Amino acid sequence: MKYLLMIYDNADSRELFAGEQGAPLMAEMDALFAELQESGELISTDALADPSNTKVVRAPDVTAPVVTDGPLAEAKEHFGGYLVIDVASEARAVEVAARFPSTRFTPMEVRPILGDAGEEM
């Protein structure tokens, strides 16, 4: 089953992964990505730009959308990236999330992706 692992971070946690000081954390993350690619469990992953680049669009009238600076929710942590994995169980998805280095500093959400088996959710 496919899962979306939503990475949350903040300016402080992003700084931990930057530069020479973050090299061990980045190496750990790269090793996890390599393991997931080798097992065929990693579908995709990306980091997101700083939330100051976010736009929120509301379009109750499609001809006059309202666009504001985002993100939608003001919070200390923000949605900073994601992984899409295809694993045998929710337990495996949680295991992958727990091994992701950023979860030592900020939370990660693990959410099933509805697909052909979506009716069971």
Image (cartoon, rainbow, N blue to C red):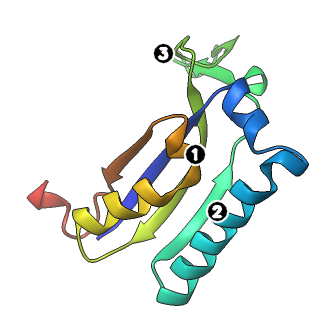
Q: In the image, is residue 88 above or below residue 11?
A: below
Nearest the eye: 97 or 87: 97
CB atoms of marks 1 and 2 within 8 Å: yes
Q: Which structural element holds mark 3?
A: loop
Q: Which structural element holds mark 2?
A: helix
Nearest the eye: 104 or 1: 104
Could you tell me the amino acid type at mark 1? Ser
Picture coordinates of residue 49, whole percent (x, y)? 76, 37
Other residues around mark 3 within 10 Å, as few (<14) / some (14–19) / many (≥20):
few
Mark 3 or mark 1: whose residue is earlier in sequence: 3
Could you tell me the amino acid type at mark 2? Met
The residue shown at (12%, 59%) is 119
Nearest the eye: 102 or 74: 102
Residue 9 placement: quadrant: top right
Mark 3 or mark 2: whose residue is earlier in sequence: 2
Picture coordinates of residue 7, whole percent (x, y)? 53, 43
65 to the left or right of 90: right
Residue 53 placement: quadrant: top right
Could you tell me the amino acid type at mark 3? Pro
- Say which mark, if any, is on residue 102: 1
The residue shown at (14%, 53%) is 121
Please identify the quadrant where the N terminus is shown.
Answer: bottom left
Q: In the image, is residue 84 above or below residue 47?
A: below
- Label 2, on which residue? 29
Other residues around mark 1 within 10 Å, as few (<14) / some (14–19) / many (≥20):
many
The residue shown at (57%, 71%) is 32
- Label 3, on which residue? 60
Q: Residue 49, can we see it?
A: no
Q: In the image, is residue 23 above or below residue 38?
A: above
Picture coordinates of residue 89, whole percent (x, y)? 23, 70
Other residues around mark 2 within 10 Å, as few (<14) / some (14–19) / many (≥20):
some
Q: Which structural element holds mark 1?
A: helix
